Image: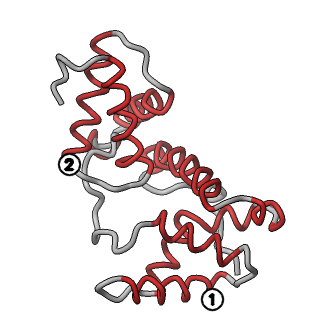
């Protein structure tokens, strides 16, 4: 994208799309991260108003730098340490919702999801991997929300709630040294 010739509307749309993928979904790609930073920087230099998600991203990133967090980590512009994701957490969330609202227990649901993903993928998906994804991104909602409310929600609606929560958690993470303090991360349901 040519930042100088792009319209403000095009820059905002491109930045929001990259923010959704890189920050909200956690799918790191250096090109997308650079595009996000370039679009937001150009918008700021033009004096354009930033949409709320981008304003939070810039504000929290700058605040993280202010307390000593590495700038790349504060703005989520470098690949997280560790192995690459084997499965997409949003796919696990949709499957978990279908099973959990059918009355399937947490550990049984994780085992079933791992088996289903292994059958579909070219490689084995470990049950512990699925359980970690659920514990990190999903199970807090099922621990806090009433079962009757969750049954009324579609997978898309649940994913929207989870994405909003993930965005807030990821923006707060630099302030707590990479992890959130007790109470902000729910225990997984039994």
Relative to 131, residue 161 above or below: above
Q: Residue at x 39, y 30 (%)?
A: 58
Relative to 80, residue 147 above or below: below
Element carrying mark 2: helix
Say which of 66 and 107 sits in front: 107
Q: Quadrant of residue 86?
A: bottom left
Say which of 128 and 50 sits in front: 50
Residue designated by label 2: 30
Q: Residue at x 56, y 73 (%)?
A: 95
Q: Residues within 10 Å of mark 1 (few under 14, many from 20)?
A: some
| Percent coordinates x, y for residue 60 in the rendering | 44, 34
Element carrying mark 1: helix
Pick whichever of labels 2 and 1 is earlier in the sequence.
2
Please state, as top left, top right, bottom left or bottom right, where the C terminus lies in the image.
bottom right
Q: Quadrant of residue 150?
A: bottom right
Q: Residue at x 57, y 46 (%)?
A: 164
Please state, as top left, top right, bottom left or bottom right, where the N terminus lies in the image.
top left
Residue designated by label 1: 108
Q: How many marks?
A: 2
Relative to 15, residue 127 above or below: below
């Amino acid at each position: 994208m040519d930042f100088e010739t792009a319209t403000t509307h095009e820059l905002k749309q491109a930045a929001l799309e990259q923010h959704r993928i890189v920050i909200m979904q956690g799918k790191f790609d250096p090109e997308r991260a650079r595009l996000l930073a370039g679009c937001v920087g150009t918008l700021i230099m033009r004096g354009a108003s930033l949409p709320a998600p981008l304003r939070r991203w810039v504000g929290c990133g700058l605040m993280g730098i202010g307390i000593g967090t590495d700038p790349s980590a504060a703005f989520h512009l470098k690949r997280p340490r560790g192995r690459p994701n084997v499965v997409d957490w949003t796919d696990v969330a949709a499957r978990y919702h279908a099973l959990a609202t059918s009355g399937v227990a947490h550990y049984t649901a994780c085992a079933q999801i791992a088996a289903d993903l292994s059958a579909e993928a070219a490689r084995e998906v470990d049950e512990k991997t699925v359980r970690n994804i659920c514990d990190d991104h999903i199970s807090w909602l099922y621990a806090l929300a009433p079962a009757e409310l969750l049954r009324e929600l579609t997978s898309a609606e649940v994913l929207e709630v989870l994405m909003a929560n993930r965005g807030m958690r990821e923006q707060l993470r630099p302030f707590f040294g990479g992890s959130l303090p007790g109470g902000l991360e729910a225990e997984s349901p039994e």
